[in-house]
Amino acid sequence: MTSLAILEKETALKPTGAAGQTAPATGSVQVRDLEHTYDASGRTTKALEGIQLDIAPGRFVVIVGPSGCGKSSLLMMMTGLLRPSSGTILCGGRPMTEPDPDVVGVVFQEASLYPWLTAQDNVEFPLSLRRMPKAERAKRARDRLALVGLNGFEDRYPHELSGGMKQRVSIARGLVQDPPILMLDEPFAALDEQTRISMGDELLRIWERTGKTVIFVTHSLTEAAYLADEIIVMSARPGRIIDRIEVDLPRPRTYEMMSTPRFAELRERIWSQIRTQVVE
Amino acid sequence: MRRLLGLALLILWEVLPRAGFIPSLFLPPLTETLRALVAGGGEYLRHLLLSLYAIGLSMLAACGIGIGAGLLIGSIAPVRRVVQPLASGLYAVPLVILYPLFTAWFGIGPQSKIVFASIYGLLPCFLGTVAGVQTIDRQYVTVARSMKASRWQMVSRVLLPAAIPTVLSAFRVGGALVIVGIVVAEMLTSTEGIGYLITRYRTLLESPRVSAGILVVVALVVAFDSLVRLLERRTRHWRLSTRSA
């Protein structure tokens, strides 16, 4: 897709704009010289090293790497939830020294909905923290729930929803403040195979409709190849970026593509990178 | 089954004293107890209301302060590490032994028993809430941080609701102790209340009236327990949910 098309989508779907906001943040992400070390049981461990990253607005970027490589930590730093030891992170041009839900929506591995709130109230929650009037936030939350295909489930409590549905609510919640960037930390890892594939399709559909920048962490190579515009491959600890793979599979992606030679080649290329990093 | 057991106990309560297995001075038959209760109805009601007033105030103080402080202190780790063992230690002290001091400070009016029962119920409320805050899923906090919740919103919108199941069980223990505290205090030194009534009739050896008073206290505790159960049922969404997707 051309950058022009992305721009069009961005402007078309941007609602009137959050009240009192200065220039709306764009969906770009820049990471410069990011390093992270932490102390555990008296030893200093280097977790991330020399991370440089530029992500253009509207891209679907997937981060993969061997377990323990710090890919989730990197994502948490980009959300502002975790402070890197050094380096800078800019999301939509703003430094992410703390979370900013107007710029970055976050979806966690476990759906992490509040069990005492209905689906509707869970999605409204971030807006209610901002003291948005009830009527307006109810409407916004309903729209988001409809976007993720959950109309009619507004009054259900999390324990009345399936795993996939919970994750849909979670995505709706991440998008409710209309941030230009959505970051997801292994969001479908706890789901079964079928649900996982259909949730992938669902996310692609949402992404195509909203034009958000999506940064997606996973350990599934198939998921990475199926979803991404670009795959970022990380090394074992200390995590570095060892490869960036442009995925040239056409959009929209279909299930059948998974059995094409090109898809297999792609998977092979990622795996050959990661294999060298996996130490048993 | 439970009802059957209850019924059996009631029948035994009637039959055993009547048959002479237990002197009716020690255990007056059920019917006699009920008759005493009905005959002295106004008096029981008046003293019950006085006790209820004291219980209400003490519960408000014990649970309000206990749960509030528990939430606050439980969520600030360094403070909790100092306060928690201290409170646990204090909880092990039978506070009843301090009651004479309370009467010296506050007189034998309702103030003494209210203060005493408040402190008596406060500790389990506090300790239960502190423990409850600890078991809150860290993920709830992380999610709220990602939405830029303020410190106050974190406590009121996340920690408090997340702690409600444990707070309720703390309330169950703390509230029951408040009732015990009030009744015991009334029995020791007081001029009014249901506990006072029981003690007075005991010194007068009016057994049916004593057991009628005991019956009222039992009813009170059962009513409190049903209230807590009702609250627990209304918050079942909390407990039914498991975090994993």
Image: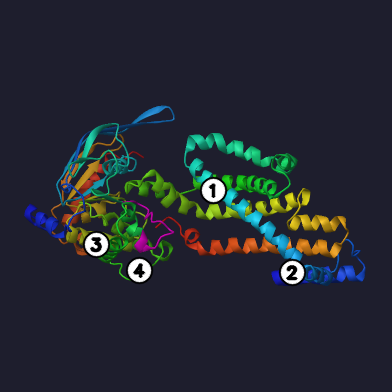
Q: Is A30 located above or below residue A134 in the figure?
A: above
- Asked which secondary structure carries label 1, the reply is helix
Percent coordinates x, y for residue B239 in the rendering: 50, 59
Residue mark closest to the camera, 4 vs 3: 4
Q: Which residue appears at 53% of the width and 35% of the height?
A: B81
Q: Are marks 4 and 1 in contact (CB under 8 Å)?
A: no
The Cα atoms of the two marked residues, 2 and 1, are separated by 34 Å
Query: Between marks 4 and 3, how big is the CA–CA gap?
Result: 20 Å
Find residue B56 and report its horizontal and vertical position in percent. 62, 56
Q: Which residue is mark 2?
A: B6
Q: Is disc 3 on the same chain as disc 2?
A: no
According to the picture, the residue beneath numbered tag 3 turns out to be A201
Asked whether B36 or A224 is in front, the reply is: B36
Q: Is residue A188 visible?
A: no
Q: CA distance from mark 1 to mark 3?
A: 46 Å
Q: Are marks 1 and 3 in contact (CB under 8 Å)?
A: no
Task: Say which chain tag 4 marks.
Answer: A
Q: Are marks 2 and 1 on the same chain?
A: yes
Nearer the observer, disc 4 or disc 1?
A: 1
User: What residue lies at 16% left-to-right and 62% top-to-bottom?
Assistant: A252
The residue indicated by pointer 4 is A153
Q: CA distance from mark 2 to mark 3?
A: 60 Å
Does label 4 or label 3 sit earlier along the sequence?
A: 4
